[in-house]
Amino acid sequence: MSPLFTPACVGSLSLPNRIVRSATGEKMCTPEGRVTPLLVEFYRRLALGGTGLIITGHSFVRPDGKASDGMMGVHSDRMLPGLKQLVGAVHEAGGRVVCQLNHAARQTKPELIGGKRPVAPSAVTDRASGLTPRELRADEIEPLIESYVAAARRCREAGFDGVQLHCAHGYLMSEFISPHTNRRTDEWGGSLEARARFPLEVLHRIRAEQGRDYPILVKLNAEDFIEGGLILAESCRIAAMMAGEGIDAIEISAGMAGTVDKIVRKHIDAPEKEAYFLPYAREFRRHVSVPLILVGGLRSLSVMADVLQSGAADFVSLSRPLIREPELPNKLRDGSTTRAACISCNCCGPDDAGRLACTLDLQLAKRAT
Ligand SMILES: Cc1cc2nc3c(=O)[nH]c(=O)nc-3n(C[C@H](O)[C@H](O)[C@H](O)COP(=O)(O)O)c2cc1C
Ligand code: SF4
C-alpha cells in the first residue's frame, strides 16, 4: 500500500491517511462571516472525498482582520450555529476538520473593515496593494492575542478537531515574524525571539487554556521572498521554538501578498515541478521532530509517496487539486488515477451558485453544451 494511505496522528488526533486539505479561502460566507448552507455542502463533499484532515479557509478572529468578502468568521459567538453545522457535516461524512485562525493585518482594505485603517506591527507599505497600515500601539497587542485565544475557544465549542495558526503569507503573525514588516523597537520587535513572541504567546495561551490534548497546528513561512524578509535559518529556529511550546504539526509554506506567484505556482505539469517547498521541509526536519506537513504543487501519487518515504514530511497538503477533484484522495486510494487533474492555471473562482469551483471545468462544461 502507498505510504499515503497509512494512518498517523497529529497530536491526539488520529487520521486515516496522510492527505491534508491545505487552507483554501472559499469566500462563501455572509458579509458578517456566517457559514452558509452552500459552504456546509462544500465541506461535506470534501470530507466524503477521503481527505484525512481538512483545514478550513482562513477565518478572521476579529472584524478588523477580515481579508476578503465572504471570509469565514470565528470572531463572535453569533457564528457558532453555522460553525457547528460545518463541523457536523464533516464528522457525519467521517472526516476531521481544523480551523485556520487569521487576522489579515495590512493585507486587507479599509472598505472590508468598516472604513478603518488596517493595523500592523509596523507602518510598512504593502507593495502589492500600495496600502500603508497604522502601527499597532503596544497596548493594542494584548487584546489581539486574546482574540485568537477566544477564537480557539469558540472553535472547540463548535466541535473543530483543532486549530491552525496562520503564520504564513504576510498576514498578522507572519508580519510580526518578518524583519521586513516588523520594525518595532519594543519587546515585540528586533531580535528573532521578540518577533516570534506574538505567535508564541498566542500558542502558549491557547495551549494553557485548552490543555495538552487539543491539536494546535501552524502554517509557517520558511521564507518571505522579500528583501530583508524572513529567511530559512530563522524560520527553522522559530519552528524549534514552537515545538518547545507544544505545537502538534507544522505546515511549511513561503511568500507574502507581493509574491503570490511563488506561493501558488502555476503550470505544475511535470514531477520535477511538484513539491516546490520540499527543500525547506528537509531543512526543517533537521531542527524539529514534530510532524511536518508539506504544501505546494503536490500532484502525483509517486511524488507524494516519495516525500513521505524520504522522511522529509509526514503529511502532504493540497489546495487547488481538491477544488477540481474533492474526491481525489479516494481516487488515488482505489487506483482510478495516479495524478491530480488540476493543471495549476490559477483560475479557480466562484461558479454561478457562488461556490468555489474549477473555472477550467466550468469552461469545458459550457463548451460541451
Ligand atoms: C483559492 C485559494 C485560496 C487560498 N486560501 C488560503 C487560505 O485561506 N489560507 C492559506 O494558508 N493558504 C491559502 N491558499 C494557499 C494554499 O493553501 C496552498 O498553500 C497553495 O495553493 C499551494 O498548494 P497547491 O499547489 O496544492 O494549490 C489558497 C490558495 C488558493 C488557490
Ligand atoms: S481552475 Fe481548476 S485547473 Fe485551474 S488551478 Fe483552479 S482547480 Fe486547478
Image: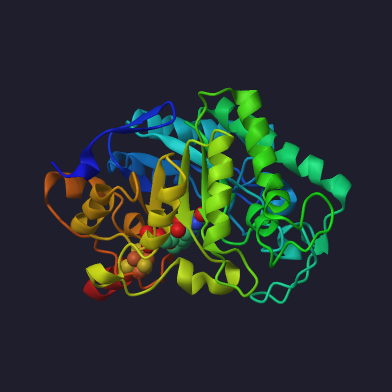
Q: Is residue 77 above or below residue 226?
A: above
Pick the residue in front: 172 or 86.
172
Could you tell me which residue is drawn at 63 percent across and 56 percent down? 174
User: Where does residue 364 sit, x and y in percent of width and height?
Assistant: 26, 72
Residue drawn at x 64%, y 31% as measured from the top left: 206
Is 206 placed above or below 324 here?
A: above
Q: Is residue 286 left or right of residue 267?
A: right
Depth order, front residue of 10/83: 10
Q: Count the marks: how many? A: 0
Q: Is residue 313 above or below residue 230?
A: above
Q: Position of residue 352 (x, y in %)?
A: 43, 62
Whether residue 357 is visible, yes or no, is: no
Expressed as whole percent of the image width and height from the top left, the position of residue 51 reads: 31, 43
Quadrant including the C terminus:
bottom left
Name the residue rendered at 20%, 60% in the picture: 339
Residue 150 located left or right of residue 186? left
